[in-house]
Amino acid sequence: MIVDADCHISPLREGGNITVEELLRRMDRSGVDKALVWLTPPYGREIDESNAYVHAAVQAHPDRLLGFGWADPRLGVEKARDMVKRCVDDYGFFGVKLNGAQNDFFVDDPKISLPVVEEIAKTGKLIAFHCGVDAYERTHPFRIAKIARRFPQMQVLVAHMGGVGFPDMSGAMIEMARECSNLHLIGSMINHTSVLDAIKALGAGRVCFGSDTPFALMHVCVATYEALLEGEVTSGGKAQVMGGNLLRLFGLGA
């Protein structure tokens, strides 16, 4: 089974956004069985409406889509906390994402971000972070590792694992993941050799396939991973990377 761990959808079609219908078409073309979905930055519409759109998409296609929420502390800490509660209690999402690059905050900021992180930790759900050189200081691996150490029971997804540009921060992200067993890397928008380095350093059980659709072509990403993993990991390891790890983290077996 192939599960894409990084897909964005939006109720808006302009600006390169894609709707859930277009995502499903791309999944069918690519042979992807399920996809983690969260909103598309920038929101285009108010964040609550975008999270609601993700929820409606998951409700309409529960066999294909895995819903994940989004909170923006820059809109106010209390509002962000309310977003977390709505995402978990009302929408039943598997977790909530914070994006310090898109929303312009340090992910470990004690006044802006950490209160929202604490709210997510209280739910028992996962948290996800954008980690990339497009926001080198705000989303640096050592900041994400500080959070992972502070909340060792909370499982942390790291989208892009320090990529989204060159040179990337994958070396630092892999080092932090070695120290923090609750860090799980999504290899989207990252150099392919960095993904292989992560698998060799952490094992196939800590790295997830992701495309970052619509910012990359899903069918090309699937083909790239197929070629990348061939001869490098066992068939069982490949199954973990291509979907099993995310399903396990979400309590869906595999």
Image (tube, rainbow, N blue to C red):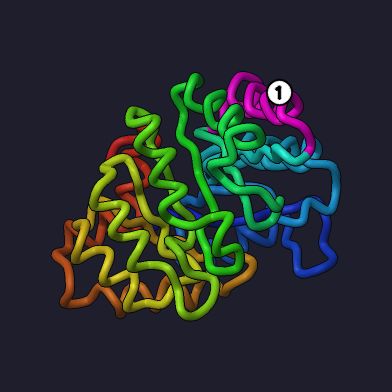
x then y, percent, for residue 76:
77, 32
x then y, percent, for residue 28:
53, 63
Residue 76 on the magenta segment: yes
> On the rendered image, what quadrant is the N terminus found in?
bottom left
Classified by dominant secondary structure, the portion drawn in magenta counts as: helix
60 horizontally vs 250: left or right: right
Q: Nearer the viewer, residue 139 or 110?
A: 110
Check disc 1 and report its element: helix, strand or loop. Answer: helix
**What residue lies at 76% left-to-right and 69% top-to-bottom?**
16
Q: Quadrant of residue 85?
A: top right
110 horizontally vs 195: left or right: right
Q: Nearer the viewer, residue 218 or 85?
A: 85
- Identify residue for label 1: 82
Q: Nearer the viewer, residue 210 or 55?
A: 210
Three-letter amino acid code at the position of disc 1: Asp
User: What range is drawn magenta here?
Assistant: 75-93
**What residue lies at 48% left-to-right and 62% top-to-bottom?**
160
**What residue lies at 54% left-to-right and 32% top-to-bottom?**
117
